[in-house]
Image (cartoon, rainbow, N blue to C red):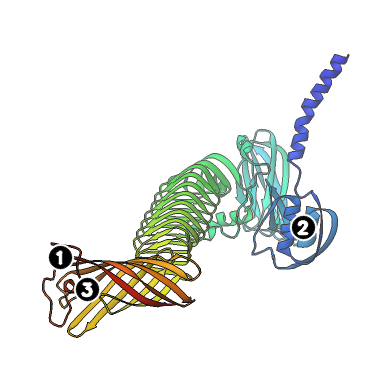
């Protein structure tokens, strides 16, 4: 008897543990009890407080949820759903997925009326009408779908719908969705085939989608998705299923039919172009790929890719890539790459790259690169580079940054809140020099011009160089500078090049005024062998430490000057 009891007890423990585990895992976020005591607090702040108390995250359209509105609430031990209903005036519905709660604006109620639900030739055929629950008006473009089978349809102008589902004796669960209406679900006990892909869905079959930045709002998204697909995306914005494979000819003509925009596929092969919720594996489009959500691993298109979420992996577009989220990996195109948020990796384009957020990695383009926020890495362009905050290296003809703790290397380097100096100086060769220095203290460019005016001894020079300011205390700094100048000795047909390495000490007298002085090393190359009347001949001005050379002259000189700004 004791042995029998032990076996029964062991059986009960084994049987009930999974049930307890599932119950714990499936605990509703909305059913958690919290207390909220706020007075005239912004709705956005109250939602953050609820997130912290419930240990979850809200997802909502900030254009609809007015986060600046003021809330006064004094409740104890209410469920999160009751608190939300009170604050949002029962005008929203809530969907849970993983650790998120989606707030969907749905002040209206709809109803589904069944006209026909019969089995014919191995199929289960359902037809009926969708109406506004209050007015009775027939609703056009409402989505009616069976989530497990990934089959759906839209109601017509008369509110009518019809679905044909394969019958295997299992229940049919139809859901009706329409923008601004609460979802309605109806269960039919007659059977339909339920796809084994259900095991790949998350607990509720939902993932987070961003209503503000959908690909349907992009130029290419509007061009290559149908009106029915746009309506379906609006109605089913929170519903995303998963499947192992999709093959499509054009958007809407695929193995998932018009439901393709709600499915994340492991593999997606598109003859002309495809329209998916996302890809978690590999996608190939001979012309284009459109993905509402995230794309992982590899995405290749003959002409363009448009992704509404993030890209993690390699994205190759023949001409163009547009990612509305972030990129972590490699992005390649012949013309243009665009990332709305952040880039962590490598971005290569034939013309230009534009990342609106921060970049950590490499941007390489023939024309230009833009990073809207911080840049840590290297920007290389044939013409121009721009970033808000440079923490790496810019290499291009024109480099622009708002702030910089990095290095800009080019002909024109502009840091808006950086190093700007107007320098006046004199040296052993040229009596008067003016220089414009721009960039950062780490590395600034120098545009300089100078002249020597003595009786019958003129010289003119202009050139370009780089410098660096190294702090040596509150007022003192060391400024090594290297410049290359063309010196005019009365004959433009001759090559006269002066290279200078100046090592000046700078004393900052005031915020916008400093003085400097120091030695210099000079190397002068010239193929001009004779002086021109009225002009100085540089080789005759200095004692050279280079012997036995007709072209090269070298000497040690000096410089002294002042700087403004």
**Is 86 placed left or right of 500 in the picture?**
right
Q: Position of residue 151 (x, y in %)?
A: 60, 44
- The residue lying toward the viewer, choosing from 498 and 274, is 498
Q: Earlier in the sequence, mark 1 or mark 2?
A: 2
**Front-most of residues 556 and 200:** 556
Q: In which image quadrant can residue 532 be found? A: bottom left
**Residue sitting at x 60%, y 56%:** 210
Q: How many residues crowd mark 2 within 10 Å: few (<14), some (14–19), many (20+)? A: many
For residue 246, say whether it is visible. no
Q: Residues within 10 Å of mark 3 (few under 14, many from 20)?
A: many
Task: Tell me if residue 97 comes above or below residue 123 in the rendering.
Answer: below
Judged from the image, the secondary structure of the residue bearing numbered disc 3 is: strand
Q: Which residue is mark 1?
A: 551
Q: Nearer the viewer, residue 177 or 31?
A: 31
Which mark is nearer the camera, 1 or 3?
1
Mark-to-mark CA distance, 3 and 2:
77 Å
Per the image, the residue denoted by label 2 is 84
Residue 443 is tagged as none
Residues tagged 3 and 2 counted as in contact (Cβ below 8 A):
no
Outermost residue toward the left in this view: 530
Mark 1 Cα-neighbour bin, 10 Å: few <14, some 14–19, many ≥20: some
The residue wearing badge 3 is 487
| Nearer to me, 59 or 432 | 432
Q: How far across and down, in percent of the image, does residue 191 sit?
A: 68, 36
The image quadrant of residue 518 is bottom left
Disc 1 to disc 2: CB gap under 8 Å: no
Describe residue 483's horizontal placement relative to residue 94 as left or right: left
Which mark is in front, 1 or 2? Answer: 1
N-terminal-most mark, 1 or 3: 3
- Image quadrant holding the N terminus, namely top right
């Amino acid at each position: 008897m004791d042995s029998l009891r032990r076996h029964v007890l062991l059986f009960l423990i084994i049987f009930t543990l999974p049930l307890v585990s599932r119950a714990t895992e499936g605990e509703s976020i909305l059913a958690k009890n919290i207390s909220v005591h706020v007075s005239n607090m912004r709705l956005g702040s109250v939602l953050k407080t609820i997130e912290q108390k419930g240990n979850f995250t809200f997802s909502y359209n900030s254009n609809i949820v007015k986060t600046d509105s003021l809330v006064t609430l004094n409740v104890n031990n209410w469920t999160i759903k009751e608190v939300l209903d009170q604050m949002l005036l029962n005008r929203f519905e809530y969907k849970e997925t993983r650790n998120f709660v989606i707030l969907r604006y749905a002040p209206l109620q709809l109803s589904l009326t069944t006209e026909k639900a019969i089995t014919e030739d191995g199929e289960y055929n359902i037809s009926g009408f969708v109406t506004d629950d209050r007015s009775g008006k027939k609703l056009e473009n409402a989505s009616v779908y069976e989530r497990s089978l990934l089959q759906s349809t839209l109601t017509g102008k008369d509110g009518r719908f019809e679905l044909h589902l394969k019958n295997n004796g299992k229940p049919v669960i139809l859901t009706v969705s329409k923008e601004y209406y609460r979802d309605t679900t109806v269960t039919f006990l007659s059977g339909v085939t339920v796809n084994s892909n259900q095991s790949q869905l998350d607990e509720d079959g939902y993932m987070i989608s961003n209503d503000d930045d959908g690909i349907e709002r992009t130029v290419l998204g509007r061009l290559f998705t149908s009106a029915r697909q746009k309506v379906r995306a609006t109605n089913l914005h929170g519903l995303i299923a998963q499947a192992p494979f999709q093959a499509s000819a054009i958007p809407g003509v695929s193995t998932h039919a018009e439901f393709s925009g709600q499915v994340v596929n492991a593999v997606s092969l598109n003859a002309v172009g495809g329209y998916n919720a996302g890809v978690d594996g590999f996608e190939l489009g001979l012309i284009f790929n459109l993905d509402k959500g995230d794309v992982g691993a590899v995405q290749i298109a003959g002409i363009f890719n448009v992704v509404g979420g993030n890209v993690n992996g390699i994205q190759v577009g023949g001409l163009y890539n547009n990612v509305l989220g972030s990129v972590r990996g490699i992005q390649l195109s012949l013309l243009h790459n665009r990332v709305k948020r952040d880039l962590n990796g490598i971005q290569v384009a034939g013309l230009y790259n534009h990342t609106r957020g921060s970049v950590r990695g490499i941007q390489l383009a023939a024309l230009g690169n833009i990073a809207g926020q911080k840049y840590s890495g290297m920007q290389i362009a044939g013409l121009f580079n721009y970033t808000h905050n440079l923490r790496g290296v810019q290499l291009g003809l024109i480099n622009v940054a708002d702030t910089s703790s990095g290095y800009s290397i080019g002909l024109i380097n502009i840091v808006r809140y950086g190093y700007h100096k107007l320098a006046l100086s004199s040296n052993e060769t040229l009596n008067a020099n003016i220089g414009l220095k721009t960039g950062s203290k780490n590395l600034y460019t120098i545009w300089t011009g100078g002249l020597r005016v003595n009786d019958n001894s003129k010289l003119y020079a202009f050139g370009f160089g780089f410098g660096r300011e190294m702090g040596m205390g509150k007022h003192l700094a060391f400024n090594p500078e290297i410049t290359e100048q063309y010196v005019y000795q009365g004959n433009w047909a001759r090559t006269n090049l002066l290279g200078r390495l100046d090592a000046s000490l700078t004393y900052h007298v005031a915020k916008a005024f400093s003085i400097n002085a120091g030695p210099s090393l000079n190397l002068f190359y010239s193929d001009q062998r004779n002086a021109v009347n009225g002009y100085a001949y540089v080789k005759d001005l200095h004692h050279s430490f280079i012997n036995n050379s007709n072209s090269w002259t070298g000497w040690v000189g000096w410089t002294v000057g002042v700087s403004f700004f």
